Amino acid sequence: MHEKPFETITVQHVLDRAKVSRSTFYSHYSDKNDLFLSDVEDFFEMFSTALIRNNDTSNRVAPVQEFFAHVADMRQFISSMTASQKVRDVFDLGQGHFARAIEQRLGTLPATRTLSPTRRSALAHASAGSLFSLLNWWLAHGNAATPAQMDALFHQSLWSGITVPAPRPTSMPTVASKSIVPTTRKPR
């Protein structure tokens, strides 16, 4: 995809480059799209779970800085995906992988481990959507901030929206109502 538009790449081009037979290719992939999406799946699985695999002890839920730095290095590839109209499929796959990894990470952090599974899942999916929205903004604005700044922005936004709700009382305490406004009597 660095050399030619995706739609002009044939399976034969892949076979020639990889030096594999057609039967070997088709025993693993149904077509060039399947090969492409399989590689994308592997990439996002590796990136989205990096903090978990590396036993990171920070409160970060996703390796945003590392991800954005990689995307910055792959600018030409991103342009190729955009031109071939593959970027939406790629971002959708990425969002799903990051949502699952963020949910898993939220389950291990002290501040969020007690959240209900439903709330943790919803927060993870919203956060993954936010991550890819920030990535779209960042790419559209020519990498206006550093990957470290985007990481800080993402995590600041995430943590400002996560609060563990205080337990609700089962009944409201009753308070006797007394008027504190003095009554004045009219003189007779």
Image (cartoon, rainbow, N blue to C red):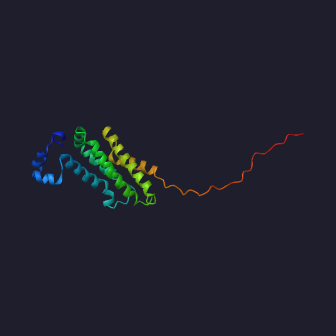
Is residue 106 toward the left or the right of residue 4 in the image? Answer: right
Q: Nearer the viewer, residue 35 or 126?
A: 35
Q: Is residue 15 visible?
A: yes
Residue that lies at the very extreme toward the right in this rendered image: 188
Q: Nearer the viewer, residue 153 or 123?
A: 123
Residue 54 placed where, x, y %? 31, 60
Query: In which quarter of the view is residue 82 placed?
Result: top left
Residue 91 placed where, x, y %? 30, 45
Is residue 72 toward the left or the right of residue 129 in the image? Answer: left
Query: In which quarter of the view is residue 28 placed?
Result: bottom left
Q: Nearer the viewer, residue 2 or 28?
A: 28
Q: Tag count in the figure?
A: 0
Q: Looking at the rendering, in which quadrant would you find the C terminus?
A: top right
Q: Residue at x 84, y 42 (%)?
A: 185
Q: Looking at the rendering, in which quadrant would you find the N terminus?
A: top left
Residue 135 placed where, x, y %? 33, 44
Q: Is residue 5 visible?
A: no
Residue 19 placed where, x, y %? 9, 51
As displayed, is residue 10 above or below residue 174? Answer: above
